[in-house]
Image (cartoon, coloured by chain):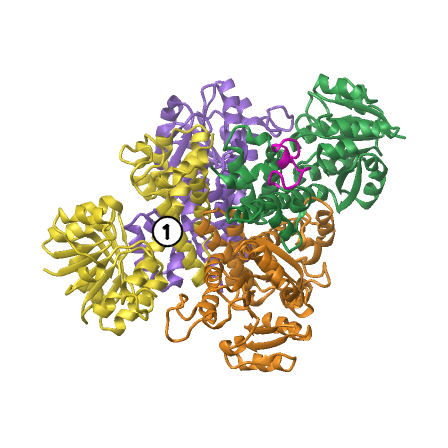
Chain colours: A orange, B green, C purple, D yellow
Amino acid sequence: MATIGFIGLGNMGGPMAINLARAGHRVRGFDLSAEVLQAVAAQGVEAAVSAPAAAADADVVISMLPAGRHVAALYLGANGDGSNSSGPGLFEQLKPGALVIDSSTIDAATARQVAAAADARGIDFIDAPVSGGVGGACAGTLAFMVGGSAGQFERARPILASMGKNLFHAGAHGAGQVAKACNNMLLGILMAGTSEALNLGIRNGLDPAVLSGIMQQSSGNNWVLQVYNPVPGVMETAPASHDYRGGFQVDLMFKDLGLALELSQHSAVPVPMGSQARNLFHLHKQAAASNGALDFSSVLQLYQGH
Amino acid sequence: MATIGFIGLGNMGGPMAINLARAGHRVRGFDLSAEVLQAVAAQGVEAAVSAPAAAADADVVISMLPAGRHVAALYLGANGDGSNSSGPGLFEQLKPGALVIDSSTIDAATARQVAAAADARGIDFIDAPVSGGVGGACAGTLAFMVGGSAGQFERARPILASMGKNLFHAGAHGAGQVAKACNNMLLGILMAGTSEALNLGIRNGLDPAVLSGIMQQSSGNNWVLQVYNPVPGVMETAPASHDYRGGFQVDLMFKDLGLALELSQHSAVPVPMGSQARNLFHLHKQAAASNGALDFSSVLQLYQGH
Amino acid sequence: MATIGFIGLGNMGGPMAINLARAGHRVRGFDLSAEVLQAVAAQGVEAAVSAPAAAADADVVISMLPAGRHVAALYLGANGDGSNSSGPGLFEQLKPGALVIDSSTIDAATARQVAAAADARGIDFIDAPVSGGVGGACAGTLAFMVGGSAGQFERARPILASMGKNLFHAGAHGAGQVAKACNNMLLGILMAGTSEALNLGIRNGLDPAVLSGIMQQSSGNNWVLQVYNPVPGVMETAPASHDYRGGFQVDLMFKDLGLALELSQHSAVPVPMGSQARNLFHLHKQAAASNGALDFSSVLQLYQGH
Amino acid sequence: MATIGFIGLGNMGGPMAINLARAGHRVRGFDLSAEVLQAVAAQGVEAAVSAPAAAADADVVISMLPAGRHVAALYLGANGDGSNSSGPGLFEQLKPGALVIDSSTIDAATARQVAAAADARGIDFIDAPVSGGVGGACAGTLAFMVGGSAGQFERARPILASMGKNLFHAGAHGAGQVAKACNNMLLGILMAGTSEALNLGIRNGLDPAVLSGIMQQSSGNNWVLQVYNPVPGVMETAPASHDYRGGFQVDLMFKDLGLALELSQHSAVPVPMGSQARNLFHLHKQAAASNGALDFSSVLQLYQGH
């Protein structure tokens, strides 16, 4: 069993840390929110007073943070380049040979930059963003998309297996973030496209369940029709049948589509379908102040109008 | 066994008529092409000299024609309203109680118009467009999306079962065409979106097979990743691995997206994702004169550029 | 002075007919609405009991109708091909050498079809759709975009000059409709694009009048900034400053963008910007039942959200 | 006359610095390229060995750099926050009361961040991006879009007037960058939309010059039709008539549309028309390796296909 420092214990990070503790690891966690720290402490995760304290003597460090700048600051220091005096990054402190797993969903460029700094110090760093949502985090059934060497991927496998089910080795450093950006952009396209096709049929007289069934058994078949139908009442377990509560928020899909756009801009690769999906979530998000917090399948409402 | 008149014996209609003959029905077929007529005659379909001759004394008439105006002219007469003198429509000639199955992919408005004229004469008319391509037509495994009453659907079922496998009752008259337009618009979105996501990953260093595998097991999963991967070499059976030959032509996808747009215009239902997919197939189609005849998964080439 | 039959006396046709009468022509008008007929009769236009009656002995016939099918029916007969018995088209009745001006905004294909039928009978037919709105129709300052031969254009010029100011010879038959479709598609793009740019600036702290002024004097300059600013209060004379009343309705812009899309589909010419503009007017139109009747600059509201 | 330090002497900055020298100012310039430094030195600009040397004792500092990170590094130091030891930013060195004009086209967020740091030290900083291209820079006819206080704008006016003609006060700090992003996004929309409308007309038989003339006198009128027609041969002075050489490069338009997208993402304001224009320049840019260096009106070629 390993000694693990876990930084970032929010909706996703919290249950992930708890699952690691349940698996028998010694887990020391840190979060800026005292409330959050207290909650995980009740379930086997030791509360640390700072990120460096959580990482002290750790064999493994895992982070789950909102954006690239937080990840760079955590590992490289306040300026993102290890040069500042206000606080060194964790890489200054970690012993060579440590394993660092960043499960945040961030831009690939930052992931590669941090990985290069880790390599220079003999630290094994992998980018390992997840999919599966809060439900998957609690159940320990997340999917991990990992960027790093084959050896690093194998080294991380037993740790990841305590938190997730599908472990994918996407490729070299940054590839985990690229894979996640591609998948979630495609997911945004599937959701907008399926909502649109269903709405077109419904407004022309078709029953949503009947049309959903036909398309699911035809060439329109996709994940949204299988497990996440956006029309209320068609699928009992889908957020659409629960006032679009729970699930994956519009704001998060908008963030992920923004990461895909950023990747598109930096690598000069066109994404016209992804940018169209982003337009629609964008228009939906600002049609009412509360829409951002709804499940992303609520984009159907943009099509329904009055 | 029934006496069946079959009008339109092209790539799709030919094998469908042959399958009906094999099932033991008496099939009299007509097509404007003498060559096509001869080909089906060799496989048990009687060649008729005209559409009225093919439909004489038929219990069932089936049509497989390119566009709504051809269907209207066939059944309602040259002017599409039964009033012209140059040639009456088949509805003038058919006995009350006949069953008419139109398997053409046409606009829903024409399908409803023809169905209303049939109702007025006591003829059972259903719109029953298919999916499954030439392969499905030959193998007798087509899917039928049927618009008509429940009774009409049940009456047609044994006939359809000789030509296809999945028989869907989409709803009232026109619903078959609406369902097909929705499904194929969604298919166009899936193909463009999946090509785009794969290209974004490939250009950022990922292996296409690895990324395809990850997305297929994640929330990006869809029919294109399952059976029709657009990247050459990833899936041996896909048209992409055979120079984009065979399969479903760009020109046909463009036609189907045009039908969806037309439905959108007439019913005032917005289809921003569908119109974006149409834009991309459109740009691809005119980037080289020969692109229209390629399989529609070749839209990936639009993204690949030089 | 000519004897003119005028068919279609609505918001546009009414004032156009009145202007012709004021210019000294003998104008006999027909409209399906008795109310409308009565209104123009009070201003010098003789009310006829039918289209054929309005066109009896006319040197010139002018039509202003909603769609291609109405124009085809008027000139070619109820079936659009001159063959029906319920009522022959006006071309049956007109004397060779008559001049026919269709000012309806319709599809180019129908315009060409009707022109060919006219040519075969020695009738001079031009397509001559207008721009300038109800205001221009009343003031006699419409722009005409004319398709036909140079001789036909010159022959029509004095008649058109009684109703409009800018007379453009766009090209051969149908070219007037093509020019109008291109211009109005571009107008839709200008309006959506300008609304979007202004909204982006406003939401980032800029004053709408200041930003409008800057862009009007820079490379963003366009007709919308010059005379039709979509932000309430920036331009006193614009519909935006009058609750988006008057002006050019969303429903009409949506119709025109549909004509452009149809032209794009039939000629296989891609229009991604036009289809995006159409998407936005479409989403706006169905966001509230009353939006269709607002001036089209109200598309700004789609961007403003809550 | 003022002592001016000018940092960044490329295609734009070089002629701007020369115009200042011609107006009688003492100008000390710096650029990383020795070649560029030598060229301006021949025309009255003193070559400095470093940015700090150029700014030594300057009353006014002007910068013309590629991106936000360069601007932040120049003024705030290598880490963009003034904290690093490898080299202080110019703000450390400038005397209180100095005037700093950043004419780079960068993101508004960085402009505001730098302005806040300047304010804290009693330095007058304005963001003042330009439009007008290399031609305008040489001729001294640039437009400046200025963000800053009214007093700062007035203080900068005489300096700006030596380099440009239209001086716009867009609003508070950052407003210059926002105005430029809005205008150039709109310009991208105008160019793509006008190219598309012209291509639709041409492919349907219209003469490009005739259609351009009609739309220029109608509601489709915009800057592109007025001075920058994208069809070769229509306008002798436009880049289109010179193999799309000179003018404003596709790569620069793509950069500017990226800045607009970034602004859209950060401020959560939807830009569906702008993102569609970006898609088209993107597809055009990667259709051939050399397209990025063509004038942006060459986007017409994307529509023309084979």
- Residue C90 position in % (x across, y down): 54, 26
| Left or right: where A21 falls relative to D154 | right
Near-viewer residue (C140 or A229): A229
Near-viewer residue (A67 or D135): A67
| Left or right: where B1 falls relative to C42 | right
Residue tagged 1: D256
Quick one: quadrant of the N terminus of chain D?
Answer: bottom left
Mark 1, secondary structure of its residue? helix
Task: Report crowding for label 1: few under 14, some 14 to 19, many 20 or more residues within 10 A (C-alpha).
Answer: many
Near-viewer residue (C6 or D185): D185
Output the chain of dot 1.
D
Question: Does any portion of residue C162 appear in the rendered image?
Answer: no
Name above or below for residue B265 compared with residue D263.
Answer: above
Q: In which quadrant of the rendered view does residue A219 lie?
A: top right
- Residue A147 position in % (x across, y down): 56, 57
Magenta segment main secondary structure: loop
| Left or right: where B84 falls relative to A181 | right
Question: Which residues are the magenta region?
Answer: B230-248
In the image, farthest residue toward the right: B1
Residue A250 is covered by the magenta coloring: no
Identified at 50% across, 31% down, the residue is C108
- Residue B240 position in % (x across, y down): 62, 36
Name above or below for residue B149 compared with residue A103.
Answer: above
Identified at 80% across, 19% down, the residue is B41
The amino acid beneath tag 1 is Asp
- Residue C302 position in % (x across, y down): 48, 57
Residue B246 is covered by the magenta coloring: yes
Question: Does any portion of residue B195 appear in the rendered image?
Answer: yes
